[in-house]
Image (spheres, helix red, strand yellow):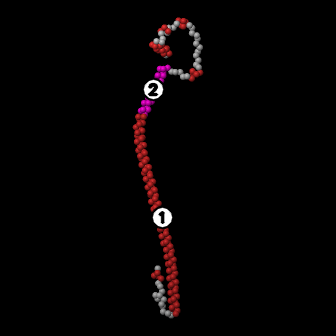
Amino acid sequence: MPNQDFAQELKEEFKKGNLKPSQLKRSKSAETLPLPPTPPLQKSKSAENIPLQPRLSEQVKKLKQDLVFSQNTAQNYLQRLQQLEPELDNLKAELKTLQATNTQLIDKNNELRLQALKDFGEVRANQQGIEQAVNQLVSTEQSQINYQVQNSQLLREKKDLEKRLQTAEQRIQKLYQLKGLPHLANASYLPLFNTLF
């Protein structure tokens, strides 16, 4: 395509008036001159690193392909975005519901904790009352046991005193009999211990 580019440049120069057709004619002497042999061209080391420019039509074709690819990608992204927007709205609504539920659960949890503390206070007070009642009951039972022990001791002492009294009465009776006195041992001057208990 370099010839087309060259021809295009020539046409432009003609239009501007910078070039005349007589200047384009080849001289016959230039045609007859032998051309010196051209040595084979070698690429310089720096030229090896420079990438070759693709032709303009290839560049346009590549750019069109890139454009089509970008358009398809953008269209795919747009479709995916349109699909995800309702899902996002649903997730936002669900998140709000879950946050409200979470707040309610936190409030309920706090209420239950407060109630548990109150119940614990009541249970503790009841437990202290029960402990006091148990202590009083134990104290009362110990007092009853002490009274029973004292009562049994007094009963033993009473029986012992009654036996002594009987033996004393019997001695007195014998003494009256020995002295020949009437039997006054049943007289009322001796107290009746049976009535004391």
Q: Which residues are magenta?
A: 55-80
Residue 23 in picture, x, y percent from top left: 50, 9
Label 2: which secondary element: helix
Callout 2 crowding tier (Cα within 10 Å): few <14, some 14–19, many ≥20: few
Mark 2 vs mark 1, foreground winner is 2
Residue 64, relative to residue 102: is it above or below? above
Mark 1 is on which residue type? Answer: Glu
Residue 183 in picture, x, y percent from top left: 48, 91
Residue 45 in picture, x, y percent from top left: 59, 21
- The residue nearer to you, when weighing 168 against 65, is 65
Mark 2 is on which residue type? Answer: Leu
Whether residue 125 is visible here, answered yes or no, is: yes
Identify which residue is drawn at 50% across, 80% down. Answer: 158
Q: Residue furthest bottom?
A: 180
How many marks on residues?
Answer: 2
Q: Main secondary structure of the magenta part?
A: helix
Identify which residue is drawn at 52% across, 92% down. Answer: 178
Rendered image: mark on residue 152: none
